[in-house]
Every structure is written in C-alpha cells, then in structure tokens.
Amino acid sequence: MRSLTLGLSLLVGLSHGAALNKRAVLTDCLAEAGIAMDQIDSNDWETDTRPFNSLLAYKPDVVAVPTTTEQIQSAVLCGAGAGYKVTPKGGGHSYASYGLGGEDGHLVLQLDRMFAVKLDNNTNTATAEPGTRLGHLAVELWGQGKRAIAHGTCPGVGLAGHALHGGFGLNSHTHGLALDWIIGLNIVLANGTLVHASATENADLFWGMLGAGSNFGVVTSFELNTFAPPANLTWFVANLPLKKETSVAALEALEDYTLNTMPAELNMRVMGTQRMTQLEGMYYGNKAELQSALAPLLNRTGGTILATGTTDWPGSLQHFATMSLNQTHPHNEQETFYSKSLELKSLNGSAAQDFVSYWYDQAKNVTGSWYFQLDLQGGNNSAVWNANHTSSSYAHRDKLYILQFFFRVTTKTIPPEAVKLVDEWTSATIKSIPRSDIGVYINYPDLSLNRTTAHEMYWGESMPRLQQLKNEFDPNELFYNPISIQPDITV
C-alpha cells in the first residue's frame, strides 16, 4: 500500500476551498502537482469531452491528463479536496457517457495517454496501462509474443470500462469474459492510496472491481493472463430465412443448440434488421470443422452459410472491426443512437412468441437503421458458464443470452419512433419472464432505469457485498455517476 502526500501549499489551498472559487482551487492543486489539464475549447478539450453517444454531451468542470501513477494519486486527492466527483475516463466509449461523469461538473481524469502494454514472455502475463484500447492491446500482445486475451470486437473501446464491467466478445464462448483474464490490479483509492488487488491480496476489493470496477477506485495498471490463439480461425456469416410463423421454432432450436450442442470452439450471435436475419461469428478451426459444427443448427432452421474466411488472430479481430486495430491517442468515434439491453436465461415459449410478435408486427414496419443483437453467452460448453461464478461481482454468468436493441440515426436527435421501438420491444420481450431471470448488461446500459432498479438489474445478488465494499473504500462517493453503487447506510 502506498500513499501520497500533497505539498504544504496545496493543503493550505484546499483547506480554504470553501472561501475560494472551487474550480480555481482544483486547477491550482493540479498545476502544483505537475498534472496537465485541457484548456477549455482547445482541440484537446474538444477531443477528450466528445461523447461516444452524441446525445449525452456532459461537460466536465476540469479535464486532467495524468501520465503517471503518482499523478493519478495527486489528481484524486486534488479532486476530493476541492469537493469534486472524480471520474476516470479510459476509452470514452460508454453508451451513457459515464466516462464524463454521466452528468455535468466532474473532474475527469483522461487516461488515454497511458497505453503501454508489456508482455513477459517467460510467464505469458502482461501489464497494460489504464488508457489502453482493445485494439492496441491485441496488436501489442500479438506482436510481442503471439498472445491474446478474450475481449470485444471494437478496437477503440477502452480496456478499463470494458473489462471491469464484464467484457463479452466474439471469443467469450471459448475463452470467457475479459475480466476472467485479469489476475491483478493496481488501484488508487478515494484517499489517494495505491493498493494492489488480486485473488490473494485485497481479495474482496478484487472481487468488486471485477464487475463493478468504476465504483471503488482508479486502476493504474492491469495484470493479465494470456492465451495462445490457434493458427486458424474461421469467420462466417449464415442466412436464416425466417418468417413470422417459423421464428419461434427457430429461436427454440437455437436455444437447444446453444445449451446442449454448440462446441466451445464456436462463438456466435444472431443479428436481425428490418430486412434480414443472420448468424455471424468466429470458429476456432478451419472451414470444414465450422460446417460440421453448424450443421445441426442450420438443418433445423433452414439456414445456409453465405461466406467464410480462414485467418489468424489479428485477421479475425480485423474482420469484425470498423477501423484499424491499433487505436491509441487521439481517437475520435461518435454515433447518435438509442439502445437497451437484456441478459436472459432463456428466450422460448411465451417469451419467444412475444419477441417475435413485436418483431414482425411492429418493428419490421419501422424504417431506419435498427437492429437486435442476440449474443450467445452461455451453454454447457461456454467458458463464461464454466468459470467460477463466485470469483467476480459480474452477476450474469447464469444468463444464456445478451440481447441488445439498437437504433442508430444520422441526425443529432432521436425520433420518437426509435425510442418507441426500443422501449416497446424490450418490454414485450420480458413481459412473461420472471424478474429473477432478467438482468441488464451494464456495458449496454438502460438509461430509463432509476438508480435502485439499475443496481438490481446490473449487479443483482452481488449488490449487498458491493455496498459493503463501497462503505469501506469510498463512503463519500467520490467515484460517482447517476447509477453508481451507494454505501450501505444500514451499516
């Protein structure tokens, strides 16, 4: 455990904070600690405060740009002393702009200048700085030793927000969630102390960080286990010629296949739009092995493989990426969209009928760039399911599916029909499902949830223990956003 002491003049300045301009106290403190800050309306300010979802353009009071662990410690202390909420921002890809605080007025710690990755070729473990993006991590691990971790498909997404809240991707059925590859964390706590957490050191904090990491501190470095990808991976797209009268049976065939037949080497999702329904994914092996693996499902659903390609690990990632893999600073990516997600134990019977009825009777009549994405997270051969369910605070390892409804527009406002489609389709899907069988993936958040319901949907049975950890490590809610975990006030 390592603490940091601010200089005397900083402490004096902070002690008179109530009598001085709050922002001036903060910027003076940061300046004396040698921490760079974005000047308001500068190019850096515009880049660092640009939200991924253009609808949620929150304005921080100050954007600090630390480049060392010591500077992160100082920035946390400066923010706390000046009465600010402190928000670390790694990739800035949050659907809800939680990296900007989820509201105006925060001290944002812009971490994307810290993106070094180092692989130890003796132990096959790696360290990554907190501003590392997924694509850069993949490029570095491959280049330094042909190693990898499980993670999502978007190169610009930050490792921190992604992995600390789950980290599902099109390799998770084979290799688990991104958080499953974290073996250690260095964390700056609300009091400025630097601690190390792992399964054997500060184990309770480590458990909480793996699933709810934004609530307890600022990660300054990740320690990662890695795996060696196979020489051949085969991407694929398959058409599902569904009609309203065949879709429920197809969903039930998919569920049976996912639960009982889908091999560990297969990673797959269903993509549906107004005009088509397809399977897409990645198989750890060659085309012939892929065809054999998919045959039981395609035979039951009438599906056909449209395209395949066999490649190496970087090629498999690049296939699903919309940009080059090696993303660092500066990085600009923005969309305008409205979305929601569900994590479900099943989608059959009445629930499947409700989902299909809205799909064909309502959604297909709405013109626009909408889709649903049904990720196959679970199943008897899934690494997500077969991992230790008590090793992290991620609450939804028991869910078979991650289902996302997404409506993208090219304007800067969301039309009413987009909100109506996403809201109603979500509600229709779950109206016959027991509440205990439903969750929400926090990396695809639902902005309509109030704080109490968000806690239930995102963290479920992990909440009591997470609230106790909040009491211990951040009782004054320095690390706050509108749905962050609250301390247990009964303790």
Image: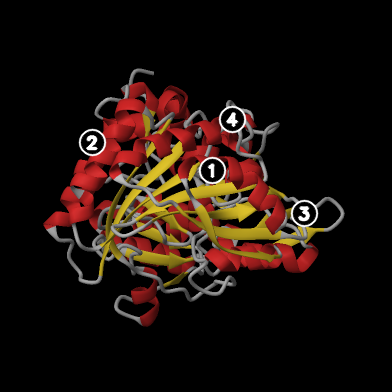
> In x, y percent, where is residue 393?
51, 32
Above/below status of 188 relative to 58: above
Q: Earlier in the sequence, mark 1 or mark 3?
A: 3
Give the residue type at disc 1: Asn
Cβ atoms under marks 2 and 3 closer than 8 Å: no
Give the residue type at disc 3: Ala
Q: Is residue 162 left or right of residue 448?
A: right
Could you classify mark 4 by the number of other residues whose Cα lies within 10 Å: few (under 14), some (14-19), or many (20 or more)? few
Q: Which residue is mark 1?
A: 299
- Spatial distance from mark 2 to mark 1, Cα to Cα? 29 Å
Q: Earlier in the sequence, mark 4 or mark 3?
A: 3
SS label for mark 2: helix
Residue 228, labelled with which disc? 3
Q: Is residue 365 left or right of residue 280?
A: left
Q: Nearer the viewer, mark 4 or mark 3?
A: 4
> In x, y percent, where is residue 317?
60, 63
Could you classify mark 1 by the number of other residues whose Cα lies within 10 Å: few (under 14), some (14-19), or many (20 or more)? few
Give the residue type at disc 2: Ala
Q: Using the rendered image of the protein, determine whether residue 339 is visible from the camera's viewpoint.
A: yes
- Spatial distance from mark 2 to mark 3, Cα to Cα? 42 Å
| Residue occupying the point 24% across, 29% down | 431
- Spatial distance from mark 1 to mark 3, Cα to Cα? 33 Å
Q: Using the rendered image of the protein, determine whether residue 195 is visible from the camera's viewpoint.
A: no
Cβ atoms under marks 1 and 3 closer than 8 Å: no
How many numbered markers are drawn? Answer: 4
Q: Is residue 265 left or right of residue 135?
A: right
Q: Which residue is mark 4?
A: 260
| Quadrant (top left/top right/bottom left/bottom right) for the N terminus | top right
| Residue occupying the point 55% across, 63% down | 133
